[in-house]
Image (spheres, rainbow, N blue to C red):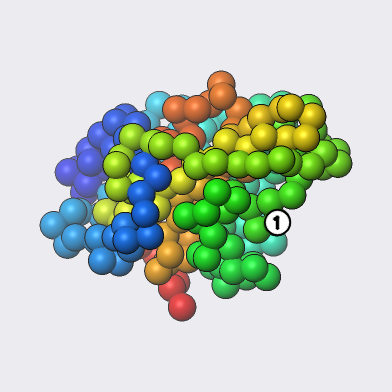
Amino acid sequence: MAAAAAAALALLASGCGGGSGGSAAPSPDSTYSAVVAAAEPPSTAAGFSTVEIQGIRIGAPKNWSIDKTGGQLCMRPPGQDSCGYGAVKVIPHVAENDPNKWPKKQYNNPDGWASDPASCRSLGTAASGGTGVTGAEQVDVDNPQGLTQHADGLKSHHRVWEVTCQNGDTFEVRLWFLPQSDIAVYAWSVDTRYSTLYDKIAESMNTDDYKRD
């Protein structure tokens, strides 16, 4: 267990990300290796505590608020009263419960940043939801295969989009998606003050106790 905990802390500190790879990127189950010891989320790391939903354990910043509703977990940064701008969602059985099977069918597409990619989510428009978008593009990230490794050894497809709104605003969306496990870690609209923190949250996820269908 000491080695596993050390592995988790090292993974948290590394801040490694993913890139916008193609559809041939390995799926989580095929990239899991028994050589990689399952590690605990970084509950002992400074500034983090472990939260859980449906057997998914993940590190949450200690000064963020935690909500569980509708089968999802939401981490809200200080000053945010709703699970919107700046927040991170952990969504079990995400495509199974989405009417458009998002993001399983869309995560490699320019408009795959949402199940219904119609409304602007910039800081000035996120609350009202009344502003449309004019386009979106996927942004390259660090890993050339577009993969992120999590604390349990599984790898997710990591995607980042920059979306342009009708009023000229832009915003960023980040997704970590495990297609076989059907789990998403989702930064709904990125607050750039927490840019590195989002990656560390996602990397800390451990799904050992999650019930897969």
The number of numbered discs placed on residues in the rendered structure image is 1
Q: Who's the residue at 57% across and 72% down the image?
A: 96
Q: Is 181 rendered above or below residue 77? A: below
Q: Amino acid at mark 1?
A: Asp
Kindly indicate the quadrant of the structure image that contains residue 137.
top right
Residue reaching furthest to the left: 35
85 horizontally vs 154: left or right: right
The residue wearing badge 1 is 116
Viewer-nearest residue: 15 or 137: 137
Regarding residue 107, the answer to whether it shows in the image is yes
Relative height, residue 66 to residue 170 (above, below)? below
Asked if one can make out residue 55 in the rendered structure from this viewpoint, the answer is: no
Tell which of 70 and 114 is nearer to you.
114
Taking the spot 22% from the left edge, 46% from the top edge, the residue there is: 4
Q: Residue at x 70, y 56 (%)?
A: 116
Given the current orientation, which residue lies at the most extreme bottom position? 213
